[in-house]
Amino acid sequence: MVVGILTLELLLAGADSLKEKRKVLKSLLERLKHRFNISVAEVGRQDSWNYSTVGISAVSGEMAHTQKVLDSVVRFVESHNGVEVIGMERELL
């Protein structure tokens, strides 16, 4: 069993308030969960309306599959309107 952990630092350029930030993040996180069958949550910078730290985990029987899923997640987040990935940390266990 391989566990992949991905931490993304995000800049939410379109958010002008915490309410708008929550709206953008909720939509993004739900899409990620359903599309990639992963666990995802905001794990930092909850009080900042321009930034967010998101934690993502994926479990698979093969390391190559876990890496592929995490790569796909990063590409999906990068293509999401109003969201820019400004930092990333990946760990495979």
Image (cartoon, rainbow, N blue to C red):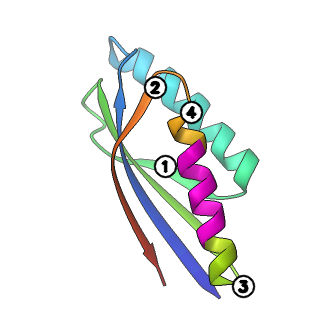
Mark 3, mark 4: which one is toward the viewer? 4
Q: Residue at x 29, y 25 (%)?
A: 50
Q: Secondary structure at mark 1?
A: strand
Q: Is residue 90 above or below residue 19?
A: below
For mark 3, what is the residue?
61
Q: Amino acid at mark 3?
A: Gly
Q: Is residue 59 left or right of residue 45?
A: right
Q: Quadrant of residue 89?
A: bottom left
For mark 1, what is the residue?
41
Give the magenta-colored segment's residue range: 67-75
Q: Secondary structure at mark 4?
A: loop
Name the residue nearer the viewer: 27 or 70. 70
For mark 2, what is the residue?
22
Could you tell me how far apart the alpha carbons at marks 4 and 2 are, in whole angstroms?
A: 18 Å
Could you tell me how far apart the alpha carbons at marks 3 and 2 are, in whole angstroms?
A: 33 Å
Label 2 crowd (10 A; few <14 / some 14-19 / many >=20): some
Q: Residue at x 56, y 78 (%)?
A: 3
Q: Amino acid at mark 4?
A: Ser
Which quadrant holds the N terminus? bottom right
Q: Is residue 19 above or below residue 28?
A: above
Horizontal and vertical percent position of residue 16: 33, 11
For mark 4, what is the residue?
79
Could you tell me how far apart the alpha carbons at marks 1 and 4 are, in whole angstroms?
A: 19 Å
Q: Quadrant of residue 46?
A: top left
* Magenta segment includes 83: no
Check whether the beta carbons of the residues at disc 1 and disc 4 lie within 8 A of each other.
no
Q: Amino acid at mark 2?
A: Arg
Could you tell me how far apart the alpha carbons at marks 3 and 1 are, in whole angstroms?
A: 23 Å
